């Protein structure tokens, strides 16, 4: 069965520092990959997605992610974190085929805390 | 369009009662999903509609749960005979096409006493 692993439950970084959140997936084929952010009291918002092509994808709010097929990873990065980035971040996958499972499979999330 | 909306935002109920949640997707979206999220976890898939047809149900969806999308627009999720283990955030999402972004609503937080 497919699964998504986010090894870091909680990360604390200083404002202005760089950030990398890890995501690994276990899947029979290369799935579509997503990163979502969830702030308290807010719905999940899509940061970026990867379907195919260039393995470095740019998203909103200055985030980017790199797909590495050999490592089954899709890590999220930001060069300089802002206090407003404090939130819960979820990596998610979905089957790419028409006959596959259409619903997203999420990791358990990484909570980001930003220190002033 | 104001995005996906869910009502109510919060629901407190006693064990054994029935509850119903509503989701209004983005108007042009034909795909609608329900997820459940417990504290400290990522959302887990419950069920999926394409137009009015319910195409997939998770094993998480016990026989106490039922979902409908009668006219292919809004959807309802009903939980009968609620249990304390049903306490969670229930999220609804919609998308316009297979593989495209799913847009999430703010969720309905259910507390079963």
Image (tube, rainbow, N blue to C red):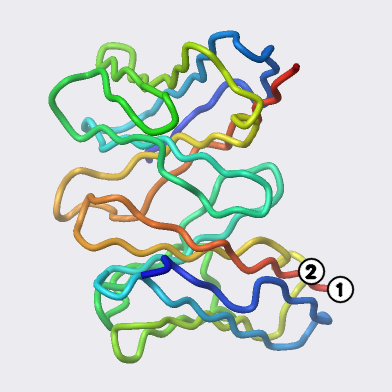
- Residues tagged by mark 2 and mark 1 found on one chain of the structure: yes
Considering every residue shown, the one lying at the far bottom of the view is B70
A29 to the left or right of A42: left
The CA distance from mark 2 to mark 1 is 6 Å
Please name the residue shown 60% across and 54% down the image. B37
The quadrant of the picture occupied by the C terminus of chain A is top right
The quadrant of the picture occupied by the N terminus of chain A is top left
Considering every residue shown, the one lying at the far right of the view is B113
Q: In the image, which disc is placed on residue B29?
A: none
Chain to which the residue tagged by mark 2 belongs: B
Residue on which the image places disc 2: B84
A8 to the left or right of B98: right
Chain to which the residue tagged by mark 1 belongs: B
Image x and y of residue A88, in percent: 61, 36
Ranked by sequence position, the earlier of labels 2 and 1 is 2
Rendering quarter of residue B81: bottom right
**In this orientation, which residue lies closer to the viewer: B74 or A97?**
B74
Dot 1 alpha-carbon crowd within 10 angstroms: few under 14, some 14 to 19, many 20 or more: few
Q: Nearer the viewer, mark 2 or mark 1?
A: 1
* Whether residue A64 is situated above or below residue B96 in the rendered picture: above
**In this orientation, which residue lies closer to the viewer: B2 or A109?**
B2
Residue on which the image places disc 1: B113
A46 to the left or right of B20: left
* Whether residue A55 is situated above or below residue B65 in the rendered picture: above
Image x and y of residue A58, in percent: 30, 25
Q: Are marks 2 and 1 in contact (CB under 8 Å)?
A: yes
Please name the residue shown 30% across and 50% down the image. B101
Please name the residue shown 35% across and 35% down the image. A48
Image x and y of residue A110, in percent: 60, 29
């Amino acid at each position: 069965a497919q699964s998504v692993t986010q090894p870091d439950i909680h990360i604390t970084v200083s404002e202005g520092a760089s950030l990398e959140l890890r995501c690994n997936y276990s899947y029979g084929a290369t799935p579509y990959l997503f990163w979502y952010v969830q702030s308290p009291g807010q719905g999940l918002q899509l940061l970026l997605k990867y379907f195919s092509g260039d393995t470095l994808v740019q998203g909103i709010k200055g985030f980017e992610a790199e797909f590495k097929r050999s490592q089954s990873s899709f890590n999220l990065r930001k060069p300089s974190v802002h206090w407003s980035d404090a939130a819960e971040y979820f990596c998610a996958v979905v089957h790419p085929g028409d006959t596959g499972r259409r619903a997203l499979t999420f990791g358990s999330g990484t909570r980001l805390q930003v220190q002033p | 369009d104001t995005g996906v909306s869910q009502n109510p935002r919060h629901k407190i109920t006693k064990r054994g009662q029935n509850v119903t949640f509503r989701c209004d997707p983005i108007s042009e979206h034909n795909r609608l999903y329900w997820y459940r999220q417990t504290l400290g976890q990522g959302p887990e898939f419950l069920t999926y509609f394409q137009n009015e047809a319910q195409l997939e149900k998770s094993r998480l969806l016990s026989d106490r749960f039922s979902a409908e999308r009668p006219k292919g627009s809004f959807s309802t999720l009903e939980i009968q005979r609620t249990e304390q283990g049903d306490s969670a955030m229930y999220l609804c999402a919609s998308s316009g096409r297979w593989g495209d972004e799913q847009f999430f609503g703010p969720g309905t937080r259910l507390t079963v006493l």
